[in-house]
């Protein structure tokens, strides 16, 4: 693992879409501008976002997921054998109406050699240059493991489907690496789903957990030595609402103890994620990375009390050594283009708070 990644201060990756970007996407959808015009505006807004991140003290730079509508679907529906569609029901987030859209299997799954995310990464890398560390985010293969996605008649079993998905992701990681990517973050709400459904009689918890583990072990098995791959686990993020609850305990031995990630960005801003005790399994993981504590909420604008955050870091440090801990917001600020309910100024205040606390706890990276 790189000596500097993930840094002690980092972010999950998505940022609130700017007014200019939202207008451009609306104009494109309405047929008022073409794809080239939209891309040009996206480039301009991402360039501004990169500078905003640098001005906020961020050293790990993303494109804010500005070219996406969803944190996960835009990537998944551009794989061979996966298509987007409008379902009858949307995700059941708490107290908010979610836009209806999802993915499903429509053929044999494989990596798409013309996947647009490779070009998107290269564009970001060109904008950033040598001013920071470029991080790119993609969804986990586990996001395809829900029955309504895979069980469409193409595959005889979930295991057969998973085998092809794993190969597609191995090819994806190779493609990102060849394009120059050295820091990839794999976002994975599926572990949160497992925690939420633990103990429910109609849910195959053990079988689902085993495939989730095997998926991650498989795609990380051939990871290049000089490529950092982290994961982010949360419980849903849409217009400042959430989808899931449940502590990490049921999945901790597998997720923290057996997966070879270089870092684990973990939701810890509310008691819905439980306590730090499950992190003990991380100490037995032979692949030593970092635990990134998501103690700063990205859902609401109120700033956390520094002393309280530092106290929680100290509490976690009783389980995981302080130097193997880091700090970040609990999730992105806009997992979908709608974004969370706060202003851009409030967003950057959150980011700066992370930087300030990290500098006071760990010093400079």
Image (spheres, helix red, strand yellow):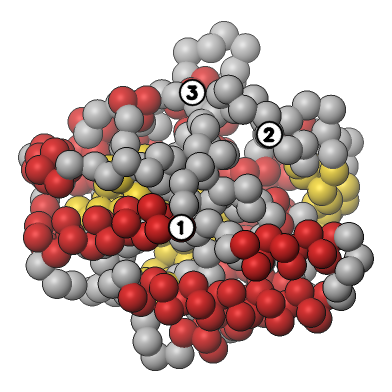
CA distance for labels 2 and 3? 19 Å
Sequence-first tag of 2 and 3 = 2
**How far from the left and from the top, in percent, is residue 41?**
69, 77
Residue with the mark numbered 2: 98
Q: Nearer the viewer, residue 330 or 182?
A: 330
Q: Quadrant of residue 319?
A: top left
Q: Are marks 2 and 3 in contact (CB under 8 Å)?
A: no
Cα separation between marks 1 and 2: 22 Å
Q: Does residue 213 show up?
A: no
Residue 255 picture location, percent across and down: 39, 41
Neighbours of disc 2 within 10 Å: few (<14), some (14-19), many (20+)? some
Point 35% across, 50% down: residue: 329
The image shows residue 301 at horizontal and vertical percentages of 37, 44
Q: Quadrant of residue 297?
A: top left
- Which residue is labeled 3 in the image? 196
Instruction: Give whichever of discs 1 and 2 has the lower sequence position.
Output: 2
| Near-viewer residue (90 or 246) | 90
According to the picture, the residue beneath numbered tag 1 turns out to be 344
Q: Is residue 10 above or below residue 145?
A: below
Along the viewing direction, whichever of 286 and 12 lies nearer the viewer: 12
Which circle, 3 or 1, is nearer the viewer?
A: 1
């Amino acid at each position: 693992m790189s000596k500097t990644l993930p840094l002690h201060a980092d972010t999950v990756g998505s940022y609130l879409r700017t007014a200019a970007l939202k207008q451009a996407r609306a104009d494109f959808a309405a047929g008022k501008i073409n794809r080239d015009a939209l891309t040009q505006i996206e480039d301009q807004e991402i360039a501004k976002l990169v500078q905003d991140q640098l001005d906020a003290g961020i050293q790990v730079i993303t494109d804010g997921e500005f070219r996406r509508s969803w944190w996960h679907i835009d990537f998944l529906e551009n794989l061979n054998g996966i298509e987007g569609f409008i379902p009858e029901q949307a995700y059941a987030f708490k107290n908010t109406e979610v836009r209806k859209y999802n993915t499903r299997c429509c053929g044999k799954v494989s990596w798409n050699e013309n996947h647009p995310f490779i070009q998107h990464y290269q564009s970001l890398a060109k904008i950033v240059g040598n001013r920071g560390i470029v991080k790119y985010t993609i969804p986990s293969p586990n996001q395809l493991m829900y029955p309504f996605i895979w069980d469409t008649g193409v595959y005889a079993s979930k295991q057969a489907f998973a085998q092809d998905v794993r190969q597609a992701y191995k090819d994806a990681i190779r493609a990102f690496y060849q394009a120059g990517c050295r820091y990839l973050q794999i976002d994975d709400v599926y572990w949160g789903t497992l925690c939420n459904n633990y103990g429910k009689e109609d849910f195959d918890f053990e079988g689902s957990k085993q495939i989730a583990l095997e998926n991650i072990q498989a795609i990380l098995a051939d990871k290049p030595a000089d490529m950092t791959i982290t994961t982010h686990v949360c419980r849903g993020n849409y217009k400042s609402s959430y989808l899931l609850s449940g502590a990490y305990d049921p999945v901790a031995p597998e997720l923290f103890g057996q997966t070879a990630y270089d870092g684990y960005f973990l939701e810890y801003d509310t008691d819905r994620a439980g306590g730090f005790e499950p992190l003990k399994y991380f100490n037995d993981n032979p692949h030593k990375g970092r635990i990134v504590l998501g103690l700063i909420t990205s859902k609401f604008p109120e700033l956390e009390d520094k002393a309280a955050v530092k106290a929680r870091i100290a509490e976690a440090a009783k389980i995981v050594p302080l130097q193997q801990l880091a700090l970040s917001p609990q999730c992105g600020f806009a997992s979908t283009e709608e974004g969370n309910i706060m202003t851009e100024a409030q967003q950057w205040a959150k980011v700066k708070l992370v930087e300030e606390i990290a500098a006071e706890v760990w010093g400079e990276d």
